[in-house]
Structures are given as C-alpha cells and as structure tokens.
Image (cartoon, rainbow, N blue to C red):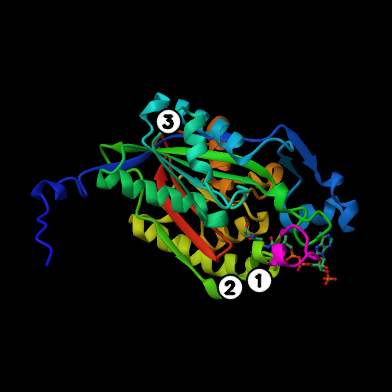
Amino acid sequence: MSMVTLSPGLGTVAGGYHSRISGVGGYRPERVVPNSEIVERIDSTDEWIRQRSGIQARHRAAPEESVVDMSVHAARAAIEHAGLEVDAIDAIIVATVTHPYQTPAAAPEVAHRLGLTCMALDISAACAGYCHGIGMASDMVRSGSARHVLVLGVEKLSDFTDYDDRSIAFIFGDGAGAAVVSRADSPGISPTVWGSDGEQRDVIAQVDSWIDVRDDAGLDFPTIKMQGQSVFRWAVWTIAKKAQETLDAAGLTVHDIDAFVPHQANLRIIDSLAKTLGLPEDVVIAKDIVTTANTSAASVPLAMSRMVEEGQLRSGDVVLQIAFGAGLAYAGQVVVMP
Ligand code: UT7
C-alpha cells in the first residue's frame, strides 16, 4: 500500500485564479486565390460558391511556408497584443490537423522558433481545435499550472485538398490565429461547453489512412473528404443548441453579448445560428469567411483578430465563440476581449 501523503499546500491554488484572453493575433498568407481561379477544374461558378457558402476568396500559403512558419507569425502578433515579452509564455497549445508529421508535434518547434523550451503540444479536434485549446488553457491557468498559455489554431489545408473534388475544393483556406490566455483578477473566460459524436466520424475525414497509402500503391496522397449536407444539418441543429448552452453556462443571455464569433464554415450556417439564437441587431457577427474561407482551427482567432484590427471589437466586449467540425467535435465559451 502506498504511504504517499500529499502536501496540504498542493490544494491551495486550485480555483484560486481567474483567466482571460490577454491578446489575439492572426496571420494570413500573402497569396489571395479568388473563386475564379478554382472554378474551372470543378465545373463550378463564382456565383454558385458565393450563394452556397458566402466565400469569395481564400489565402493560400506558399509551397515552402509551413504550419510552424504561420504559427510563429500569429504567435508574435498575439504576444505583442498582450503586451508581454515572449519569455512570459509558459505553455503552448497548437490546434491543427494539417501539420504533415505524425510526430513530433508542431508546438515544440513553434516554441523553439520563439526561443522557448516551455510545455508545448498539439491537439487534434479539427475546426473545433482552437476553442478546445482555449478551454484547456483557461483550466491550466485557473489551476495554477501556467500563467500565460499561447493557444494557436493553424492550418495549411491546401496541402490536403483535392482541387478536382467539387464538394470541397472551394471551401478551405490557409492561415493561423492565436490568443494568449493569462492569469487574471476577475473571470474573463466562461466554462467551456464541449463534446463529440464519433458515430459521424465519416462525414469529414482523411480519406485513407497512412497505412492504406503505404500498402496500396494505387492510392494517392490522402486528402480530406466531406459530406457537406450532413455537416450542414448537424451544424445548424446541434450547434445552435450548444451555443445556447454555452451562454447558459456563462450565466448570460444574447442580450449580454457584444459579438458572436462562430467557426467560419459557411455564411448560411453563420446566419442560421444567429437567427436561431435570436441575436439582437446590435450584436456584431463575424463574417471573415467571405475573404478568408474556412481555415478550420484558425477560423475563430483569425476572425476575432481581424475584428480587433478593424475596431469592431473593443476591450471589455463580451464575445460568444463556438467551433465545430470533424470528429464530429465542438467547443464553445464566452470570452471578454482584452
Ligand atoms: O469546417 C468543418 C465544418 N464544415 C461545414 O460546416 C461545411 C458544411 N457544409 C456546407 O457548407 C455545404 O454543404 C457546402 C457549401 C459544402 C455545399 O453546399 P450545399 O448547398 O450543401 O450543396 P450540395 O452538396 O447539396 O449540392 C447542391 C447541388 C448539387 O446538384 P443537384 O444534385 O442539386 O443537381 C451538387 O451536385 O450543387 C451541386 N454542386 C456544385 N455545383 C457547382 C456541388 N458542388 C458544386 C460546386 N459547384 N462546387
């Protein structure tokens, strides 16, 4: 029988701190790809893509530009916005599904590029990854395990997209978004509402496993496939309820929030969620999808950082953010802007 006795002091920090977002930042690759550049290969039109998804253009990373490169740009922007020195960061969470190495994770390399040797790991929750990361970072800060956690959502989806597949070729964009979650004197991040539905694992998925590709010479590099209508239905039905649960968990109503920043998957989904939630007219709604497309894990922080840059979000604003995607998985919380 173990005779280990825990120090009475170990319990004192739990619940002793609050957390908040202290800075946000984004990075969009330089190259802009309008719909007109991709429609021919998929027998589509600019008009169809705009009507069905709201997307007009997306940014695409340069061939040599990696998930790590993009992360470093977004990280520096968020740390600067937080008014911190880089060495104040004591943990890094990178949410991504497009870092092209099974191991090691991207996060330790991001840390190294920033001159850090702190705790650093990747999480895989697809488009919902960033909001999962914010929830985990908030809990780490509140428990006393970290003081400033850098959370990144980053994707280079152009590497995993089949540009001849009309059901997906127009949807994705590349980019990175970041936030710093810091210790605070008052609550700035609500409890996270999160969950999954693995029964629907096939509706958005890498088409073949790495083992399939290794063993079958006839298979191509595995891209991502999506049953768009199934995801659409799940998003407008389930995520609207989860967004309301997120407000409930924060003890707020739609009348208490200044902005709504949902995952930028489809403009029609965004409009539907806003309508079902009954958002008042004066709640600002993120519509970054129009020029950035769907950047998966990067979409919420990219949309948020643009809204800060353009003055649509101000310090102290209360924001409902929620993201959803492959897994299926979702996560949301209410955050106060730095
Ligand atoms: O980020 C992770 C979460 N992802 C999402 O939330 C994505 C959710 N889904 C969507 O955003 C939408 O389902 C899409 C934008 C992907 C597609 O829009 P849709 O309204 O669901 O289109 P659809 O697949 O139902 O296709 C409608 C019609 C079909 O023709 P018929 O059968 O009505 O004659 C398709 O063959 O449009 C046709 N179609 C296209 N036409 C032109 C499908 N893709 C295209 C295309 N261009 N690219």
Instruction: Assess disc 3: are there few (<14), some (14-19) or many (≥20) residues with their C-alpha within 10 Å of its C-alpha.
Output: some
Quick check: can you spot residue 213? yes
Q: Residue 13, position in %: x, y?
A: 18, 45
Q: Is residue 323 something that shows in the picture?
A: no
Please provide percent x and percent y for residue 204: 64, 65
Q: Is residue 165 magenta?
A: no
| Identity, as a three-letter code, of the amino acid under mark 3 | Leu
Q: Nearer the viewer, residue 134 or 206?
A: 206
Q: For the residue marked with disc 2, what is the amino acid?
A: Gln
> Does 64 sit above or below residue 153?
above
- Is residue 338 positioned above or below 128 on the image? above
Q: Is residue 112 left or right of residue 102?
A: left
Say if mark 3 contacts mark 1, CB within 8 Å. Answer: no
Q: CA distance from mark 2 to mark 1?
A: 9 Å
Q: Is residue 218 magenta?
A: yes
Magenta region, residue range: 212-223
Q: Residues within 10 Å of mark 1 (few under 14, many from 20)?
A: few
Total residue callouts: 3
Which quadrant: the N terminus?
bottom left
The residue that disc 2 covers is: 200
Label 2 and label 3: CA atoms lie apart by 38 Å
First along the sequence among labels 2 and 1: 2
Main SS of residues in magenta: loop
Above or below, comparing residue 184 to residue 47 in the picture? above
Q: Residue 126, located in which quarter of the rendered image?
A: bottom right
Q: Quadrant of the C terminus?
A: top left
Q: Quadrant of residue 164?
A: bottom right
Mark 3 C-beta to ligand 1 under 8 Å: no
| Lower position in the chain sequence, tag 2 or tag 3 | 3
Q: Determine which residue is flagged by label 3.
A: 116
Asked if disc 2 and disc 1 are in contact, CB closer than 8 Å, the reply is yes
